[in-house]
Image (tube, rainbow, N blue to C red):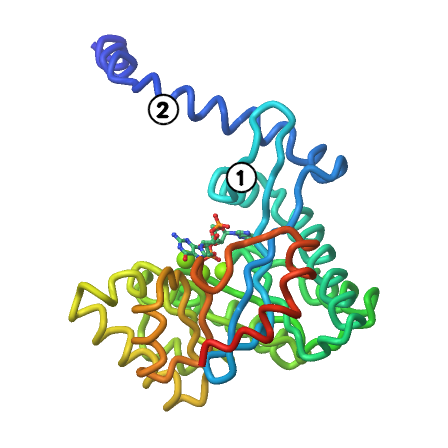
Amino acid sequence: DRAASEGRRWMTYDPAELENAEWKMSLLARLDQAVEHGEIWVAYQPKVEMATGRIIGAEALARWSHPEKGEVPPSQFIPAAERSGRIENLTAHILDSAVAATASIHRAGHTDFSIAVNLSARLLDSPSLLTMVADTLARHAMEPRHLILEITETTAMTSQDGIVQALEKLSASGVRLSIDDYGTGFSTLDYLKRIPADEIKIDRSFVSMLEKSQSDRIMVHSTIQLAHSLGRRAVAEGVENAVVLNELRLMQCDYVQGYFTGKPMKFSALMETLPSLEKRAIA
Ligand code: C2E
Ligand code: MG
Ligand code: MG
Ligand code: MG
């Protein structure tokens, strides 16, 4: 009977799912090697200040140029790296690349440029996180205030004491914190109050609906107002056109990020566009 039910279960196995599992296994097997071989690189998406139209920073986004599979998006390997204990090594690599890049942007004269790096929630438990961040900044002689760590709301909202303490230590070290994908988790006002975040980054699912949905417009507007009332800055992600940008300007959103103001790009492309984009005021 048991065998029969297992047989049935096997029969219902989706071949596409199995293939997907195998694909993820094969990716994982090569992940450490990929870091060593320099296949993992960082794309930079400009972050624009609404009031001036200046690029005031960028978000570092992990990319994997796989020799056989081509460009693998982070959604395919970040969660797997988290589950398999490889996220610390991967983050150390991404953080180092991003901080090194920012140091050279500073040397090129853009001395206020800040870099946002995504931090997996799991790393907030790691006893070496604080040292990893401090060592990376020291290695490139970069001030902590130029680094923003983005933490997704789903993690932050759990509001466990350990997580709050880890975030408080990071904040005390001078690094800035951002609550990423805001609105998609199960946030409580309590956690917004407890977490020492400098900015709230409104998820693109709300931002992209601004034109069409009155309720999304209300959500975005009140989130910006809430952020300001708490003394935080508001960032909108996923700004894809001028209509949305203009709505956000009327709502006094502080910063915008999206395909309209700049797609994620290679470091060399960022360096080339930085001066021209800085002149192209959107305000
Ligand atoms: P995220 O941190 O919310 O990053 C924003 C995502 O939205 C990026 O996708 C970006 O390319 C995309 N995006 C930006 N502007 C637009 C737009 O106007 N329209 C649309 N449709 N999309 C836009 P990406 O690069 O695929 O990254 C996906 C997620 O993977 C990130 O979401 C982040 O959670 C995670 N991730 C990326 N790099 C890292 C990393 O180094 N460490 C960790 N832990 N997670 C990372
Ligand atoms: Mg992010
Ligand atoms: Mg985000
Ligand atoms: Mg998002």
Which of the numbered marks, if any, corresponds to residue 17? 2
Whole-Å distance between the Cαs marked 1 and 2? Answer: 16 Å
In terms of secondary structure, where does tag 1 sit?
helix
Quadrant of ligand 3 in image: bottom left
Residue type indicated by callout 1: Phe
Question: Residue at label 1?
Answer: 77
**Residue positioned 58% across, 31% down in the render:** 28
**Residue positioned 64% across, 72% down in the render:** 114
Q: Position of residue 263 (x, y in %)?
A: 51, 55
- Indicate if the residue with disc 2 has its beta carbon within 8 Å of ligand 1: no
Q: Between disc 1 and disc 2, whose residue precedes?
A: 2
State the quadrant of the N terminus.
Answer: top left
Tell me, yes or no, if residue 102 can be seen here: yes
**Residue positioned 54% across, 73% down in the render:** 280
State the quadrant of the C terminus.
Answer: bottom left
Q: Is residue 2 toward the left or the right of residue 143 in the image? A: left
Rendered view: 132 above or below 283: above
Residue type indicated by callout 2: Glu
The picture quadrant where one finds residue 35 is: top right
The picture quadrant where one finds residue 3 is: top left
In terms of secondary structure, where does tag 2 sit?
helix
Q: Position of residue 22 (x, y in %)?
A: 48, 22
Q: Is residue 253 toward the left or the right of residue 48 in the image? A: left
Q: Is residue 15 toward the left or the right of residue 54 in the image? A: left
